[in-house]
Structure formats: structure tokens, C-alpha cells
Amino acid sequence: MSELLNFKVFEGYSADQLLDLCTSGEIIVSKHKQLLYQMGQKADSFGIVLSGAYKLSRPNPNGEDTIVHFSTPGDIIAAFIMAQPSPIYPVSSYAMGPSRFLKIPREVFLQKWKSQTDLIFKIQGLLSTRIGSLQTQKTLLKAPLSAKIAFLLIDILNKYEGDESTLPLPLTRKEIADSLGASVESVIRIMSDWSKKGIIETQDQQIKVLKLDKIIEEMSATSS
């Protein structure tokens, strides 16, 4: 409960209230790349990311996975589909590094969460932020790949409190490429160039932004 109380979505709730909302909840400890939810399967639970991160992905028309969102601590996965008559998961969810997830049965959402108007509004806020990020990505469709990568890094950094320069999730070049619909080779070329220029530092799939102003400059680019 102490972890949940630190998340903005539960601001104003007491430990007892959260305990009631998390009735029958189960903490899932996921290893790197371990599947949490499979796209197309019956959705019988939802939950909250406690630590680490989960990538949400679905296949594109070519059959390749496209990452649509990175869910970080405090993010809620699959809540809004719980109210559907026969919900199925619209995306697959995979852990990014060691991660923890509080899984809650669908029945609890229908019995307890659905009636919490304030909480539903906050979850809508999380969803709106996610949609906003996707819309921004669309505005960058004709921008150079460097601008798209810069936006992705800053978007992830903005979700975390603490060290504002290090992305606290193991993000591979392929995951960046899958998120942006780009080739791995192109992503590697750009990020290698940034590393040589001292803009970023990478080690063991961890990315540290050394010159945020340069990343912002890259993000502001609108043409190749």
C-alpha cells in the first residue's frame, strides 16, 4: 500500500481505501521480456505497474511488432476495457527488465473501481497523456528519425521522478526502432553518433542523456 500511495493516480486515498480497491490483488514479479498479457486473449484482470516497466505492442500489417506505449510505475494497464461485456486484450504486454505488477481481477473493477468517479477521471488522464504522446508522434511522421528518437527519450524521462537524465528501463535499439517504425540500423547509426558527440551515454541497455539541450534541439527538427 505504501507504494501505491506514492502514485499520483491514488492521491487523496487512504491505505484502507486502497486495500479495498486491491481486493484479491496479486503481485506479479516479471523477468526481462516475460509476457504479462497476450493480445487477443480474454481480459480477466487489469493492474498497476509497481516497478520496472512494460512495453505494450501489437503486430503491424507486415506482421512485425510495433510498440505503442511504455508503461512505467504508477501506470495502469487494461483498466478501461474491464467494463466491456467480453473484453479481450488489445495489445501484448512484456516486461522490460525485472518488473513488478499488481494484478487485480476484473470483478473488483466492476464492483469497486467503476463507481469511483474521481479515480476514473484520473485514469482517463493517464490515457489522455498516452493518446497525446501518440498524436505528437504522428506530427513527427515527416520529421527526421533523430527528432523522433529525441521525442521518445524525453517522453520517457518526463514520466519519472528522480534522476531526470537516466532512462530507468532497459531500452534496446530494436525496441526504439519498433516503437518508431524505423530500421534498427538507422537507430544504431544516430545513437552511435550521439554517443560520439557526448550527447548520450549508453551502458547495459541503459541510456543517460548528458546534453538535454542537444536532445531538445534534435526534437525541434521538422525536416530532413
Image (tube, helix red, strand yellow):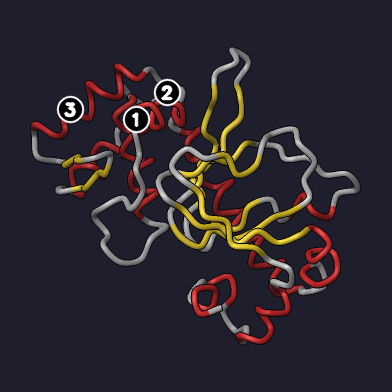
Question: For residue 192, which numbered disc appears in the image?
Answer: 3
Q: Nearer the viewer, residue 200 or 109?
A: 109
The mark nearer the N terminus, 1 or 3, is: 3
Q: Secondary structure at mark 3?
A: helix
Residue displayed at 47% across by 36% down: 137
In the picture, which quadrant includes the N terminus?
Answer: bottom right
Which residue corresponds to the image point at 91% horizontal and 48% vertical from the top-left?
A: 85
Vertical order, 68 against 85 (above or below): above
Q: Which residue is mark 1?
A: 222
Pointers 1 and 2 in contact (C-beta within 8 Å): yes
Question: Where is residue 37, by image quadrant?
Answer: top right
Can residue 115 be seen here? The reply is yes
Image quarter hosting the C terminus: top left
- Secondary structure of the residue carrying tag 2 is loop
Q: Position of residue 190 (x, y in %)?
A: 23, 25
Rate crowding at label 2 as few (under 14), some (14 to 19) or many (20 or more) other CA atoms within 10 Å.
few
Residue 6, percent from left and from top: 48, 76
Q: Image check: 13 left or right of 67? A: right
Amino acid marked by disc 1: Thr
State the separation of the CA atoms marked 3 and 2: 22 Å
- Reading the image, the residue beneath label 2 is 142
Residue 67 lies, with reference to residue 153, above or below; the image says: above
Q: Residues within 10 Å of mark 1 (few under 14, many from 20)?
A: some
Mark 3 vs 2, N-terminal side: 2
Measured in 3D between alpha carbons, the distance from the residue under mark 1 to the one under mark 3, in whole angstroms, is: 21 Å
In-image side of 175 versus 100 (left or right): left
Does 115 sit left or right of 32 as displayed?
Answer: right
Q: Secondary structure at mark 1?
A: loop
Between residues 125 and 183, which one lies in front from this camera angle?
A: 183
